[in-house]
Amino acid sequence: MANLALAAGGALGEVDRFLSPTTSASSDASTWQAGWVEAALHQEQLADFDVATRFAACAGRRSFRASVYHAISESFTPPGPLKDERYSAALHAFATAHEYPSLPIERVETPVSGGIMPAILGFGTAPRDRTRPVVMAIGGPDLTKELVYCLLADGFTRAGVELLAIELPGSGEALRLGGLLRKQAQRSSSAQRSTISTREPTGVRCDRDPGFRSRRLR
């Protein structure tokens, strides 16, 4: 998990500081979970200080890292209210990061049978260009669209390629907030390809507000 955090934008010094105590033989999942939460909360505190001192870009980067750390802490948390709390904290930190200067994104929602399939479209600092290629990235059951974005967006957008980070039914927000089950995944991925090939077809909402908040989809 430490390698995943670093690949997604985490800082080696932060990981070492907060996770070193968990390397003892007596450490268990709750110890690891607490270490990642502490790392995330520390970044959020520093982000608040950056905002107060008008270092908005730094605050955005810290919020991104807090999102990554919260997401990893959730993987060490057993099912229950605390696991939902950790997941919500990761979503909140990711949304907060986009209130400050950072890579622009759009939230793309595709209607599918039974609900909405959410995705994040990252297109870099250049204006949107409908002629640019788009890579669809699907993280799987234990990798959220936010983590996929943090892992891949910078490299693709620097190369002039847009990234669509998708959560299929049975994973992430599509499951937890939308109630979409895994058996709907194949039809949903086909619908998402249709969505991105036309970019903004009728019935698909692309929110341009980079500070979007995740909400329950009905």
Image: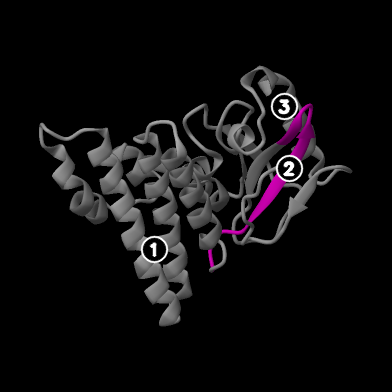
User: Would you name the residue on which mark 2 appears?
Assistant: 109
Disc on the earlier residue, 1 or 3: 1
Q: Is 29 on the left or on the right of 166, as rendered? A: left
Q: What type is the residue that disc 3 sits on? A: Ser
Q: What residue type is labelled 2?
A: Glu
Residue ID at (60%, 38%): 173
Task: Assess disc 1: are there few (<14), some (14-19) or many (≥20) residues with their C-alpha within 10 Å of its C-alpha.
Answer: many
Q: Residue furthest right?
A: 202
Relative to 20, is 207 above or below? below
Q: The residue under label 1 is which amino acid type? A: Glu
Determine the main secondary structure of the stretch shown in magenta: strand
Q: Which of marks 2 and 3 is nearer the N terminus?
A: 2
Do the numbered discs 2 and 3 sit on residues whose CB atoms are within 8 Å?
Answer: no
Residue on which the image places disc 1: 44
Q: In this view, does 159 lie above or below 32?
A: below
Q: Rounded to the nearest whole Å, what is the CA distance between mark 2 and mark 3?
A: 11 Å
- Tell me the quadrant of the picture where the C terminus can be found: top right
Q: Which mark is residue 188?
A: 3
Based on the picture, tell me whether residue 112 belongs to the magenta stretch: yes
Label 3, secondary structure: give it: helix
Residue 79, labelled with which disc? none
Between 57 and 27, the one lying in front of the other is 27
Percent from the top left, x then y, of residue 197?
78, 37
